[in-house]
């Protein structure tokens, strides 16, 4: 029953607010505001990484880094470049940020692959 309620609530929210609502009515319109929004996301991700590093064992931490790397790589290549569904930002800075995120994602996956291989 809970899953149906969540599904119906999600459909209602998407159909009524998804095209009209921004985060607290904030909208990043300039290049510096858009880069600042991406930077805020990176800072939040780093804080989550630090929390997981301190609280959990190394295998879980490496798995989390690998998941981030796969997401950065697959999301950018498949959804941003191939299908052109959305961009990291709506400006020209996306042409620099997106390849950078793909490179970072590949580095994350390679790092965790090497680290876990050493531990086995």
Image (cartoon, rainbow, N blue to C red):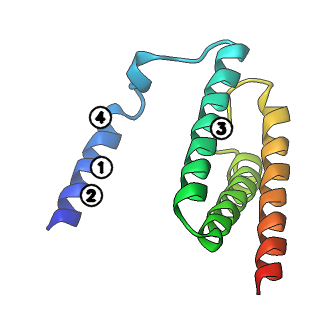
- Residues marked 2 and 1 touching at CB (< 8 Å): yes
* Quarter of the figure with the N terminus: bottom left
User: Circle 4 is placed at which residue position?
Assistant: 16
Image coords of residue 71 (percent x, y) = 66, 58
| Name of the residue lying farthest toward the bottom | 120
Residue at 66%, 22% in the rendered image: 36
Image coords of residue 42 (percent x, y) = 65, 38
The mark that comes first in sequence, 3 or 1, is: 1
Q: Nearer the viewer, mark 1 or mark 4?
A: 1
Image coords of residue 100 (percent x, y) = 84, 42
Query: Distance of mark 4 from mark 3, alpha carbons?
Result: 29 Å
User: Circle 3 is placed at which residue position?
Assistant: 42
Above or below, 57 relative to 106? below
Q: Which mark is residue 7?
A: 2
User: Circle 1 is placed at which residue position?
Assistant: 10
Query: In front here: 45 or 18?
Result: 45
Query: Distance of mark 2 from mark 3, alpha carbons?
Result: 30 Å
Which element type, helix, strand or loop, lies under badge 3?
helix
- Residues marked 2 and 4 touching at CB (< 8 Å): no
Q: Nearer the viewer, mark 4 or mark 3?
A: 3
| Name of the residue lying farthest toward the top | 30
Which element type, helix, strand or loop, lies under badge 1?
helix
Which element type, helix, strand or loop, lies under badge 4?
helix
């Amino acid at each position: 029953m809970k899953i149906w309620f969540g599904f119906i609530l999600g459909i209602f929210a998407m159909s009524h607010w998804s095209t009209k609502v921004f985060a607290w009515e904030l909208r990043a319109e300039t290049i510096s505001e858009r880069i600042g929004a991406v930077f805020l996301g990176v800072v939040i991700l780093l804080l989550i990484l630090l929390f997981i590093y301190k609280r959990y064992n190394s295998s879980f931490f490496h798995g989390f880094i690998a998941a981030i790397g796969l997401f950065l790589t697959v999301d950018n290549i498949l959804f941003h470049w191939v299908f052109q569904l959305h961009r990291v930002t709506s400006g020209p800075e996306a042409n620099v940020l997106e390849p950078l995120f793909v490179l970072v994602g590949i580095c994350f996956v390679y790092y965790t692959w090497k680290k876990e291989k050493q531990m086995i």
